[in-house]
Amino acid sequence: MQTKVENNKAWFLVLPVFIIVAFSAIIPLMTVVNYSVQDIFDQNTSYFVGAEWFKQVMLDSRLHDALIRQFLFSFTILLIEIPLGIGVALMMPTKGKSASLCLILVAIPLLIPWNVVGTIWQIFGREDIGLFGAFMGAIGVDYNYASDPVDAWSTVVLMDVWHWTPLVALLCYSGLRAIPEVYYQAARIDQASRWAVFRYIQLPKLTNVLIIGVLLRFMDSFMIYTEPFVLTGGGPGSSTTFLSQALVQQAIGQFDLGPAAAFSLVYFLIILLVCWVFYTTIMNMQKDK
Amino acid sequence: MAEITLNALAHSYSENPSKAEDYAIREMSHVWEQGGAFALLGPSGCGKSTLLNIISGLLEPSDGEVLFDGKRVNELKPEERNIAQVFQFPVVYDTMTVFDNLAFPLRNIGVPAHKVTSKVHEVAEILELSDQLKRKAKGLSADQKQKVSMGRGLVRDDVSAILFDEPLTVIDPQLKWKLRRKLKQIHEQFNITMVYVTHDQLEASTFADKIAVMYNGQIVQFGTPRELFENPAHTFVGYFIGSPGMNFFDAELQTDHQGHTRVMFGEHEIAIRSDVLTTLKNMAATKLRLGIRPEFVHVWDGKNDDAYQVEVDYVEDLGTYKILSFLFNGQMMKARLSEDQKVPSGQIFVSFPEQWTKVYVNEYLVEASTPMATSATQEVEDAN
């Protein structure tokens, strides 16, 4: 029998990547870990507190509320953006000048900076000078995102849908374009209905882009900060205060760096966990029985 | 089940076709009789797939009409024509099981569940897919996927015709042979009109009773494999069918002072059947192309008065037979030698039997006193 030669020299080839990742992610993350287990007053005065900050964060009811709000928000926008994105992609023209024009129009919201999006909607939703607010007033809806939590919530959701549905639509559009024409031809020969074509050809072929779309949209929406900050400032009350904003309030507003660091790590782990669960579930669903 | 008629059909992919080259299908008429197994044979880009898609309705022809059993179907969508088509690359519905894939066309037209089950099992049995029925189609190998594609064409028992668009391209050679036999069996069993597109002459002749050879957007000949071999109606058929293809050389029709007409290839007179010669005289065509199959070139062992002296260039041994290449009046030609024939070298003598020496004018065969010749002549006159 042949003996296998052990040779670990190949690890040197991984070294540059390792160094880059260390500087870009691991070392900064270690700083956070450092803060999360110590009470630091200044450069020379610090006390090791163990899991104290973590306990505090876990028991903080303000953060619990923010977490629940955050999940609610992420799932709401996913439920709207994914079907809507698929729908938009299905309706977009496939060739000619109208296709390019449509692509540009759809992509425009993606090119606008976060804080500008917040400002746009802040003005857009105002009753006195905003088109949307004035329109709602005109049709007799008592709408005020600054004082009513429900209005504030729906405006934040609407804003996110406006800003990010194009991403899902563009992903789906590229996925749809990659389906060979022959599948549609075969479906016509098999006398498949429009719904059957969607259910058995388009949707299965879109699975991969949809996984990317859902993961991206989940992570991004779970970390949302700028837009609601500019639009509602987290209010009224704390009705639109999501996790990032709660974290910023704690770290910069109150300068509680220890609990904020512990909170950051928990936050990070939640995102990782949800993505992992989601990805594994989808991959298992796709497997051949 | 239906007889498919193509009437003055033409198709162009450009919007304003002006010249003949703009057409993928040049005006043609053709009839595929009910219950036949046909092959549509031609090189890549000759319009085979276009023609098939026009029959199935995936493409609407620019001109002319498609008739199923005498009824015009131009305006009918493929889903209304009740036709089955198998494509070059297997199309399966990934997320469905093999059973659901086969049941799909039936469920789409609302066939009751118990009938679906029995029909799917019947077709799965024929295609040897019975033990795969519960598997997801995604995990199947290429040939199994293609069998599923074919199966979807076979489950509906009232289809007008089944069209195959080079269905065995992605299949391994050993399986190709098996699947082709399977198709033939299915044809015998169900008696459905089948049209099989291919660029492989062997595939065409093993599957089909009659082959339509397509060239430059037109069907140049429709006949049995034997007819295509022995009597190519167009120089392209001679060149494309057979391995190697027909020998062609340019000759001239000359009339001397006594009114004798002869066909001359340079210094050499080539013997032509007298009835063909009569037709040629009437046509007054002088530029001719002569064609003879390598199989019919007679290679003599010694000097012979009827034979031409030619120079051997080289001999290829292909195992069961040899191909002799020789120069005749500066023109390269080939002859097929049987394995036991002695290998000639240097200057040798060959002759072209009169009945196998075909004459072409403007690429079409000239032949006297058969119905085919009249039509060929007609076309030649049109072309002039």
Image (cartoon, coloured by chain):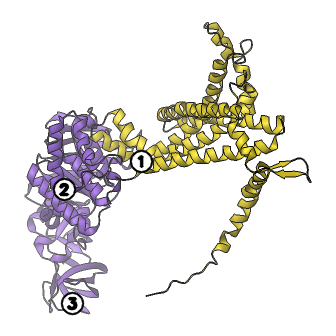
Chain colours: A yellow, B purple
Query: Looking at the image, can residue B47 be seen?
Result: no
Q: Residue at x 47, y 35 (%)?
A: A90
Q: Indicate which disc residue B127 carries.
A: 2
What kind of residue is marked 3?
Answer: Ile
The answer, for residue A150, to whether it is visible in the render is yes
Q: Quadrant of residue B169?
A: bottom left
Q: Amino acid at mark 1?
A: Met
Nearer the observer, B286 or B248: B248
CA separation in Å, label 3 and label 1: 74 Å
The answer to which of marks 2 and 3 sits earlier in the sequence is 2
* Residue matched to label 1: A285
Q: Where in the figure is residue B183, as x and y percent of width and height?
A: 17, 57
Callout 3: SS: strand
* Rendered-image quadrant of the N terminus of chain B: top left
Judge by depth and name the residue closer to the eye, A34 or A80. A34
Q: Is residue A46 above or below residue B72?
A: below
Q: Amino acid at mark 2?
A: Leu
Residue corresponding to mark 3: B348
Q: Residue B138's spot in the image, x, y percent? A: 35, 53
Q: Nearer the viewer, mark 2 or mark 3?
A: 2
